[in-house]
Image (spheres, rainbow, N blue to C red):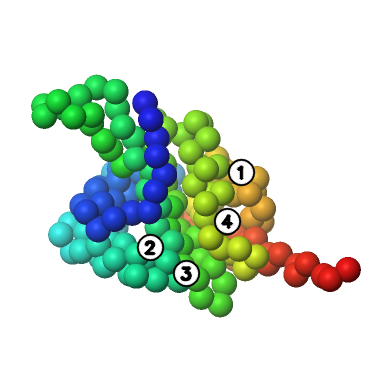
Amino acid sequence: MTHVIEPAVPDDASRLGPLLLRAWLQTYPRREAGIDEEWIREHRGAAATPEGIARWRDFIEAALRDPDLLFCRVVRSEAETEGESGAPVEEIVGVLCGRRGEEVTLGPMYLLNHVQGQGLGDRLMAEFLDWAGAARMCLWVTEYNEGAVRFYRRHGFEPTGDRELWQGRLPNLRMAREAAAPVGDG
């Protein structure tokens, strides 16, 4: 199976909402927090609706118009099997977006479970860090998503101490990667 990372295009919008919902369903169920499939569909299901897909299309189009301000990459997985048309079956299996403001905000970033552990997250992050440059970067991550917390730490992000309970249930913590010091003349 081949994986390609490239800028999202407007036609990807119809697959990104469902991808995010699928990633949430794989990642966040937590009985003790009251987070189950029903809760996730209630709070994140809108990403896969026509309105959610339209928002994705708008974001992707804006990112293509102003790539210095907005970042959006997808991971395309081309299966070696062929679909009904005889063409290889392509699926979007990951996404990383960001935006530049006073600081650079990373998110969302998701890879479906079946492609994790193959270095795709590191490849996506390398592209994002190159785009972001030396700016201070921040993100929100779910506290009990320990793999994601370790991943972000490995890429220089540290918890800031800020926390939020998203929608009254999902415990998130803020992580930041400080701005790189300017290189002196000598």
Q: Which badge, 3 or 1, comes first in the chain's sequence?
A: 3
Mark 1 crowd level (few <14, some 14–19, many ≥20, 10 Å Cα): few
Q: Amino acid at mark 3?
A: Asp
Q: Is 125 drawn above or below residue 79 in the view shown?
A: below
Q: Nearer the viewer, residue 70 or 46?
A: 70
Instruction: Specify the farthest residue to the left.
Output: 84
Q: Which badge, 4 or 2, comes first in the chain's sequence?
A: 4
182 displayed left or right of 128: right
Q: Secondary structure at mark 1?
A: helix
Answer yes or no: do the residues labelled 4 and 3 have beta carbons within 8 Å?
A: no
Q: Which badge, 4 or 3, comes first in the chain's sequence?
A: 3
Mark 3 crowd level (few <14, some 14–19, many ≥20, 10 Å Cα): few
**Which residue bears the numbered disc 4?**
129
Q: CA distance from mark 3 to mark 1?
A: 28 Å
Q: Residue at x 28, y 38 (%)?
A: 91
Q: Residue at x 24, y 48 (%)?
A: 15
Q: Is 81 drawn above or below residue 71 in the view shown?
A: above
Q: CA distance from mark 1 to mark 2?
A: 24 Å
**Which residue bears the numbered disc 2?**
167
Say whether residue 174 is visible.
no
**Which residue bears the numbered disc 1?**
150
Q: Quadrant of the N terminus?
A: top left
Q: Position of residue 174 (x, y in %)?
A: 57, 61
Q: Mark 1 or mark 2, which is nearer to you?
A: 1
**Which residue bears the numbered disc 3?**
68
Q: Which badge, 1 or 4, comes first in the chain's sequence?
A: 4
